[in-house]
Amino acid sequence: MTRDAMPNAFRPGAVDLTPQEADLVARRQAALGPAYRLFYERPLHLVRGEGVWLHDAAGRAYLDTYNNVASVGHCHPKVVAAMAQQAGIFASHTRYLHDTVLDLAERLLATMPKQIGHVMFTCTGSEANDLALRIARAHTGGTGIIVTENAYHGVTSAVAEFSPSLGHGVPLGPHVRSVAPPDPRRIGADAGAGFTAQVVAAIEDLQRHGIRPAALIVDTVFSSDGVFAAPHLLQGAVDTIRAAGGLFIADEVQPGFGRLGEGMWGFSRHRVVPDMVSMGKPMGNGYPVAGLALQPGVVAEFGAKARYFNTFGGNPVAAATALAVLDVIEEEGLIANAAAVGGLFRDGMLALAKDHDHLGELRAAGLFLGQDVVTDGAPDAVKTSRIVNGLRDAGVLISATGPKGHVLKIRPPLCFAAGDVAFFLDKLQGVLRRL
Amino acid sequence: MTRDAMPNAFRPGAVDLTPQEADLVARRQAALGPAYRLFYERPLHLVRGEGVWLHDAAGRAYLDTYNNVASVGHCHPKVVAAMAQQAGIFASHTRYLHDTVLDLAERLLATMPKQIGHVMFTCTGSEANDLALRIARAHTGGTGIIVTENAYHGVTSAVAEFSPSLGHGVPLGPHVRSVAPPDPRRIGADAGAGFTAQVVAAIEDLQRHGIRPAALIVDTVFSSDGVFAAPHLLQGAVDTIRAAGGLFIADEVQPGFGRLGEGMWGFSRHRVVPDMVSMGKPMGNGYPVAGLALQPGVVAEFGAKARYFNTFGGNPVAAATALAVLDVIEEEGLIANAAAVGGLFRDGMLALAKDHDHLGELRAAGLFLGQDVVTDGAPDAVKTSRIVNGLRDAGVLISATGPKGHVLKIRPPLCFAAGDVAFFLDKLQGVLRRL
């Protein structure tokens, strides 16, 4: 895999497709153009979802061990009903008074440290991180951004400039510095201290170029960097960016809403209180809703100078849907489930690794697992791809991540059960045997 | 009104609120923070919508003559049903094959000139204009942007830099130049030639500063500039930006989807073919879906260097909902209705203006009307606000726009009927008599 290729991307012409698949691929290329990508060597034509299962057009079922948006299960009836009910009653915007958006804001704030007092609503995680940038600039007067070296924070013009995982075709901004993730193999056994030292160096480099730091933004489980799941790593880095006049933004778009099996948010595992917390993907179980929680002092300057309005952001349907997701997480005990089933998953993977040398280091928290694939200890993106595509053929969906494309990205819906883990491990074992 | 104040914004403390209203306002300020704004001197607490009517918590009905998102009518049952049905079946993203997003793309393209061959999907108009900017930069190698002087194109970091209507607290980028809208009172009787001359001057100024032009972006009915509805104004400006190596982006987020009563898109009234067309607000009748249609040659460079993925953009629920909106526009003849009822509306306003000197120039196309409010011929934002708030008290919703806040912004759902116009005019007459 080249540095810039998307892991697990379909390459037209590499495999023979059915006439129906070929027709859909041709229609996509014609109608959507050249910037869209499909997953897998043979793309999946999915038509139905329920719980942890997805079904293709031929009626075949796939165990979804990847999609973190439908986090409480595909097409959860309670969430769909809440959305449909509110959409049938009232669906306008936040320039009228409505209690649903306030119920949601207050409920989200109740999951946060007391220092975090406001929530602003957007439609996507990209918009949330873009808004965080605007607010950080207004508050600090600075522009410098520090990110991890394969981070993904979104696709707006400004956020793409600090999303190095988009590849060299999308250049980083001149005000952006990247640091290695807290991987003890690279920055020393005390990964927290090593990470802090890197942030110190990045700040010094920004200042050396006359750029005042605005923010350090971190995905709290380092999803795109390959999943680094150890806790208690960030306090030094947070103290450092604040001492330099910048803010700390926790990007919870991937780790948030209970996936890590310990409370709602990844930042709490690091025992830090962010200045801003962006959230998205699983927030509406598929409905486009996202947001930015923040400490009030941070947004005072922005609020005095600018107004914020997002036509669809925080609309009553978005709010009702997101409230239903929070209900389901509580009622179905999904955070405890993520911890328990995630533990089984980790144990099963570790057991499998004893018999399969290609399984290298495993890093996991709750239902977010990153499994290195190696050959003679070295990253092996080709074997990673063969595992991902072999599992697809065996009826199990995952993908790959990391700067070298050699990390299995395992991230099922939070309602994953012990039997689903057993099914996954059985299929993975079969693929590994044929590798 | 100061240059930077939002027209028709609620100012806390200006009027006494009911305890329930005061409680909601206090909860908003606490939970959402200082950047949010409400409409009206006395904010509206809305709880229900149906067709062209909205209902407040006290059971009072308001004729909605303003909201262009619920464009086929609030809570249209066919649209809600399509959304709920697809959400119950499958709701994943565009990295799997699915026909719904292709059906939508092809259906949208069928409404466009043949030169426009692709559609890319986002969740908001802001994201669509932000993507247009990224593509324009990649294609042209330039960064310069030309906008009208009170334009609004969105709220991302990059798009806010070319949205002067956000006020002086949100500075324009150093690469942005603004031009007056095609208002014959300001740029001469031949507004098209006058507009072209301004674009020529803006390009020269960009080049004088060493900035290569990337794009001219224009809301095709100049919504935030005060509604300039005359057709056939843009060809010279489009030719000019292209001759300078830049692209022409038609922002159809407000004028699009039939509102102007002549076809689907405002740009066609100007007989130009844009390089890119952004669309949003009414596209899902409230569901967060938006997009960017473009000429294939424009996105070739971007597609070769970058991939585009928007987690929720173009998901099957978004696509099914947007398809239902297109169905309703066709089945209910809403474009013809916008033309016919819009004509009645215009005639009624012109008749009313004969007896009321405060009604100045009216500019209208279909169901998008901009009515100047003047005193002795001069813009009068105070009287404008009294009319907007007087209508609210009389059970009719509109708002105000324009750089001086003196333009009544009248923009009802497309299913507005002749009787609704009569109701509106009767209430407006009452307000004007008491002015």
Image (cartoon, coloured by chain):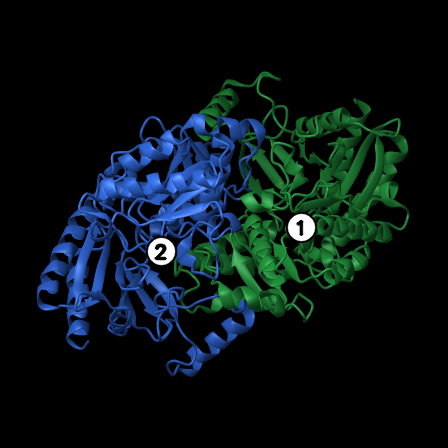
Chain colours: A blue, B green
- In the rendered image, which quarter is residue A417 located in? bottom left
- In the rendered image, which quarter is residue B120 located in? bottom right
Residue at screen point 49% across, 49% down: A173
Residue at screen point 43% across, 83% down: A19
Residue A3 drawn above or below residue B356? below
Left or right of residue A112: residue B390:
right
Question: Residues at marks 1 and 2, common chain?
Answer: no
Left or right of residue A12: residue A425:
left
Residue at screen point 36% across, 52% down: A149
Q: Position of residue A391 (x, y in %)?
A: 25, 70
**The N terminus of chain A appears in which quarter of the rendering?**
bottom left
Q: Is residue B249 visible?
A: yes
SS of the residue at dot 2?
loop
SS of the residue at dot 1?
strand
Q: Which residue is mark 2?
A: A75
Left or right of residue A298: residue B11:
right
Q: Chain of mark 2?
A: A
Q: Chain of mark 1?
A: B
Q: Position of residue A397 (x, y in %)?
A: 28, 65
Q: Which residue is mark 1?
A: B145
The three-letter amino acid code for the residue at tag 2 is Cys
Q: Mark 1 and mark 2 in contact? Answer it, CB < 8 Å.
A: no
Residue A29 drawn above or below residue A82? below
Label 2 neighbourhood size at 10 Å, few (<14), some (14-19), many (20+)?
many
Label 1 neighbourhood size at 10 Å, few (<14), some (14-19), many (20+)?
many
Q: Residue furthest front?
A: A208
Gap in angstroms between the C-alphas marked 1 and 2? 42 Å
**The C terminus of chain A appears in which quarter of the rendering?**
bottom left
The three-letter amino acid code for the residue at tag 1 is Ile
Q: Position of residue B373 (x, y in %)?
A: 80, 31
